[in-house]
Structures are given as structure tokens and as C-alpha cells.
Amino acid sequence: METSCQTTGCKNDTPPALAEQRLCVLHFTLTLESSCSVMRRETALGNAPQERQREIMKFITEHGERLARVATSGLHLTDDLKARILSTFLTLMNLRENLDRSNMRSSFGRSGHTR
Ligand SMILES: [Zn+2]
């Protein structure tokens, strides 16, 4: 059974890999990108609590896996969508890197070293 994307005005079908989210590939990547930019701002300040950092880490892993599943599930994706998926992967990877970097900064801070 096909379900359509929950985004208002979007008539695209939801692929099986995104049934839980009820989003089409395009809106899944767009939603993911915007969540990432919010988290990126959060981590950029370097004062996100450990708990929150773990949440973000989990978010990155889970969504990265889901995105990989969508990308490799044999859907007919346009070149545009393929490019979009790749750039969303890049966003996830950069966010992860940011998190590691801000972690490093805060542990330096805690042990009293400066750069
Ligand atoms: Zn959509």
C-alpha cells in the first residue's frame, strides 16, 4: 500500500524505507538538513550537555543508516535526488565532526589546557 508524503502540498509517495516517517525522499532529506543545522548551531557553541551530545550522536547514526537504506533500496531516484542524498550524508558527517571537535574543546577546557 502506498502512502503519500505528510508534507502539505506534496504529492510524492513515501518509499517503504520511510514509511515510519511518512515522508518522501525529498522531504526526508530536507527535514534532516534542517534538524542538522539546528543541532550544528547547538554544538557550535560548545556548551551542549553530554546528554544532548549523545542524543545528537544517536540521531546522526540512526538517520545516516536510514538514509543509506533509502538510497540503496532500489528506488528510481532522479540525479537531483541522488545528489541531494549525498549532500545530506555530507551534512551528517560534518555535524558528527563538529560534535567531536566541540567535545575535544570542552575536555581541554575541563583539564585546564588552552590551545
Ligand atoms: Zn514530500
Image (spheres, grey):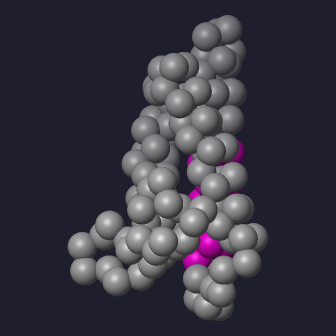
Residue at screen point 58% across, 27% down: 54
Q: Image quadrant for the C terminus? A: top right
Q: Quadrant of residue 31?
A: bottom left
What predominant SS class does the magenta segment belong to? Answer: helix
Residue at screen point 38% across, 74% down: 4
Residue 105 painted magenta: no
Foreground residue among 13 and 65: 13
Q: Looking at the image, is 85 positioned above or below residue 44?
A: below
Q: Quadrant of residue 88?
A: bottom right
**Extreme residue in the left direction:** 8
What percent of the width, then of the height, locates residue 80? 59, 88
Residue at screen point 50% across, 60% down: 19
Q: Quadrant of residue 77?
A: bottom right
Relative placement, left or right, of 66 versus 6 is right
Foreground residue among 47 and 15: 15
**Viewer can see residue 92:** yes
What percent of the width, then of the height, locates residue 75? 66, 80
Q: How many marks?
A: 0
Report the magenta residues as a range.
Answer: 84-98
**Extreme residue in the front direction:** 1
Q: Looking at the image, is 97 positioned above or below residue 54?
A: below
**Viewer can see residue 24:** no
Residue at screen point 71% across, 62% down: 68
Q: Looking at the image, is 48 positioned above or below residue 16?
A: above
What percent of the width, then of the height, locates residue 34? 41, 59
Foreground residue among 63 and 5: 5
Residue 90 painted magenta: yes
**Extreme residue in the top direction:** 111
